[in-house]
Amino acid sequence: MALWNLFLLALIQGITEFLPVSSSGHLILLPNLTGLADQGQVIDVAVHVGTLGAVILYFWRDVRMGLAGIPRLVTGRVDTPGARLAFLLLVATVPVIVVGFLLHLTGLDDALRSIAVIGWTMLGFGVVLYWADQRGPQVIPATEWSLRHAVAMGLWQAVALIPGTSRSGITITGARLLGYDRESAAKLSMLMSIPTIAASGILLGGEVILTADAQAARDGALAAALAFVSALAALALMMRLLRSVSFTPYVIYRVALGLILLWIAYS
């Protein structure tokens, strides 16, 4: 794959993975709207690995705490902050794994990869994000994440398997409706992405290993590195902006892009 194409794909994935604008939707749109060849699963997995590395590094203190709690969780004890965080992340990940596996098994995941679907989800869930952000109170910090809220946000996350929904956007929407402040909603959403992206990488990675050649592996490594840099920058910028700016700019972008895509799909 050409270097500029890899750069473009990695940049798009890195920027859109953690912003509430749907990375999968943008990756699907790129070949559909530009005529470029589909990047394939090798690059898809690679750029997701890159963004996974970025969120782990940015939230390393929380990640380290969760990892330290896994041994206690394995023995059935949820009596430390780390074990509790690991348990809640596990609970929140179960719905998306189950639904994702069923969609992959039935082939419905490919059937949903259309401009019309992405247009409607980009528009509709953008409006829902605005409503939740304006309506939701800002009283609960991330440290008070509960089992009930982990289940609720996990169910919201499963909806993001529909292209254009945005995993971060829909989980932030759910968190805001539950009463979490903007920064806490974004933080919980990002932490939830870690096991979700890892599970997706494992699911698709097995297929990739069996089919990838040396050139594909080199392209994938470069794409992962570029996605890591762009994702880290985008994540740091969004978390800083949330201290003073709402999610409205992202909503405006989603609504505008959704309307354009619907016009393209039905014209």
Image (spheres, helix red, strand yellow):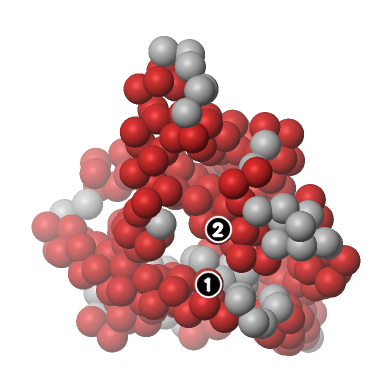
The percent position of residue 255, horizontal first and vertical second, equals: 76, 81
- Kindly give the residue lying farthest to the top in the view shown: 75
Badge number at residue 220: none
- At label 2, counting other C-alpha atoms closer than 10 Å, the crowd grade (few under 14, some 14-19, many 20 or more) is many
Specify whether 17 is left or right of 128.
left
Instruction: Tell me where residue 183 sits by quadrant.
Output: bottom right
* Residue labelled with disc 1: 239
Where 66 falls versus 126 (above or below)? Answer: above
Q: Is residue 65 left or right of residue 30?
A: left
Q: Is residue 266 visible?
A: yes
Q: Earlier in the sequence, mark 2 or mark 1?
A: 2
Image x and y of residue 23, in percent: 53, 67
Circle 1 — which element?
A: helix
On residue 187, the disc is: 2
Quadrant of image for the C terminus = bottom right
Query: Along the line of sight, which residue is nearer the eye, 82 or 133?
Result: 82
Q: Secondary structure at mark 2?
A: helix
Q: Quadrant of the N terminus?
A: bottom left
Marks 2/1: CA distance? Answer: 8 Å
Do the residues bearing badges 2 and 1 touch, measured as CB atoms within 8 Å? yes
Query: Residue 105: percent from the left, percent from the top?
Result: 55, 35
Left or right: residue 2 versus residue 78 is left
Q: Is residue 112 above or below residue 125?
A: above
The residue located at (31%, 74%) in the rendering is 229
Picture coordinates of residue 200 (x, y %)?
44, 45
Q: Nearer the viewer, residue 16 or 135?
A: 135
